Image (spheres, rainbow, N blue to C red):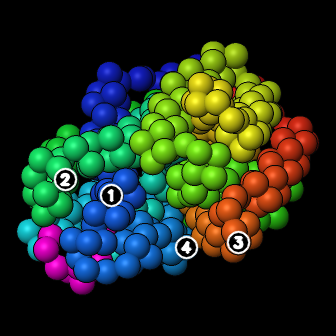
């Protein structure tokens, strides 16, 4: 009888909210320069590519830091590991604000912020497992992913407005203050674990990090999931980076491109709330992953071909709703099928796949666009083909045994 007794604490929601704030702030810092590339290039007297590097550096650094960050997460826990990410976000966010007029210092600050990112993002399933029962973990992971999308959409929508009102230096200073506040809130509110586990004994125990890593890499189910993330997350990174270039050849303006990208993230926020919650309620993961990938492919095709603005916006919303809802579902599914491998390691491996493919897809889409018109239809068709293959591959995934307990 004792083996089935456990307690769920309301304080788990406070921990999750504090964690979500740190996630949102870090992603806000990542996307800051994307909507003001031209203005920032003029302000710092550098090229557009140099401004693009301020965002691209997050993907590049992630590839290097992800595995060490996952090891720290799974070895030392969320307060130390996420604390490192929160501290880097607060300190370098503030540094970026105080030294905002110098491009070199801003680049250094971006590198510091980028180092903090994997400590935060790779911890999503770890926080869920440490504080939430198994039937709420996809919901908790979904809310963690939602915080990513909230940070991105705030950055896209707010940065142009603030840069017009307060200038780029004033904008970065405000974001620096927000970063410092997020850091303080994290250390004030987040505890390592509840007084007693939120799940039956045994569900919380995990293997040693490198033993778990070897176990995951040998699992066919996890290998398939890594390929799903390689394609799906890579497509998301590529489309968000080149959204203006994708729609410009069809006559859409920069403002319309920005709203299209923003609505895709809004769709992702809605999807990250609804789909993982439904998954928890029916205690199934695979059918929702298949549905998400299939729906995202349909939306992606609309973004590729839509000639009317209304259809473009609708397609972007559909693509975001399904594609971004697959993220938290995949994180939780990966943690469940790789049990007892550490959550941070599984989370980090999946994100690593998307960062690698993101860099490859971003450069590939630019390299294979039409030389005269700038149309990206050819590389987009290739990516749609990959998404179809990804959907078919997901059909072979098997349901998590943990959900059957």
User: Which secondary structure, mark 2?
Assistant: helix
Q: How far is disc 3 from disc 2 in space, using C-alphas?
A: 33 Å
Q: Position of residue 233 (x, y in %)?
A: 64, 53
Crowdedness near tag 4: few (<14), some (14–19) or many (≥20) residues, C-alpha within 10 Å: some
Position of residue 295 relative to residue 161, above or below, is above
Q: Nearer the viewer, residue 302 or 331?
A: 302
Which mark is first along the chain, 2 or 3? Answer: 2
The CA distance from mark 3 to mark 1 is 25 Å
Above/below status of 252 relative to 198: below
Q: Position of residue 64 (x, y in %)?
A: 52, 78
**Residue at mark 3:** 371
Q: Secondary structure at mark 4?
A: helix
Residue at 13%, 57% in the rendered image? 167
Q: Quadrant of the N terminus?
A: top right
Specify which label sits upstream in the sequence, 3 or 1: 1
* Residue highlighted by disc 2: 163
Residue topped by disc 1: 36
Of 238 and 214, which appears nearest the observer? 238
Image spot of residue 54 (x, y percent): 37, 71
**Which quadrant would residue 24 be assigned to in this image?**
top left
Identify residue for label 4. Answer: 63
Few, some or many C-alpha atoms within 10 Å of disc 2 (few <14, some 14-19, many ≥20)? Answer: some
For the point 33% across and 28% down, which residue is it? Answer: 13
């Amino acid at each position: 009888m004792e083996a089935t007794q456990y307690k769920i604490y309301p304080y788990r929601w406070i921990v999750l909210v504090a964690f979500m704030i740190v996630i949102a702030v870090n992603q806000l810092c990542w996307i800051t320069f994307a909507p003001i590339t031209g203005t920032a290039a003029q302000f710092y007297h550098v090229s557009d590519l140099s401004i693009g590097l301020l965002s691209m550096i997050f993907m590049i650094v992630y590839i290097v830091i992800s595995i060490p960050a996952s090891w720290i997460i799974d070895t030392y826990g969320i307060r130390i590991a996420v604390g490192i990410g929160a501290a880097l976000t607060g300190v370098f966010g503030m540094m970026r604000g105080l030294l905002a007029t110098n491009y070199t210092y801003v680049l250094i600050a971006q590198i510091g912020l980028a180092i903090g990112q994997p400590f935060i993002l790779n911890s999503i399933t770890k926080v869920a497992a440490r504080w939430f029962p198994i039937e709420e973990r996809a919901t908790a992971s979904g809310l963690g992913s939602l915080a990513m999308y909230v940070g991105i959409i705030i950055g896209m929508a707010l940065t142009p407005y603030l840069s017009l009102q307060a200038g780029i230096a004033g904008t970065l200073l405000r974001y620096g203050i927000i970063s410092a506040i997020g850091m303080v809130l994290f250390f004030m509110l987040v505890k390592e674990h509840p007084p007693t586990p939120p799940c039956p004994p045994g569900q919380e125990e995990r293997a040693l990090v490198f033993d778990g890593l070897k176990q995951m890499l040998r699992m066919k189910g996890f290998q398939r999931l890594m390929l799903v993330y390689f394609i799906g997350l890579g497509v998301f990174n590529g489309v968000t980076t080149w959204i203006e270039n994708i729609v410009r050849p069809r006559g859409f303006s920069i403002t319309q491109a920005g709203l299209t990208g923003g609505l895709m993230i809004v769709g992702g926020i809605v999807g990250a709330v609804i789909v993982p919650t439904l998954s928890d309620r029916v205690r199934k993961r695979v059918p929702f992953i298949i549905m998400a990938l299939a729906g995202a492919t349909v939306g992606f095709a609309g973004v590729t071909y839509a000639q009317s603005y209304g259809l473009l916006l609708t397609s972007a919303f559909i693509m975001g709703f399904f594609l971004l809802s697959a993220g938290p579902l995949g994180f939780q599914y990966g943690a469940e099928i790789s049990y007892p491998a550490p959550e941070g390691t599984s989370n980090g491996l999946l994100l690593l796949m998307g960062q690698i493919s993101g860099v490859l897809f971003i450069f590939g889409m630019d390299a294979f666009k039409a030389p005269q018109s700038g149309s990206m239809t050819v590389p987009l068709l290739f990516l749609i083909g990959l998404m179809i293959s990804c959907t078919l591959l997901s059909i072979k995934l098997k349901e998590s045994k943990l959900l059957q307990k």
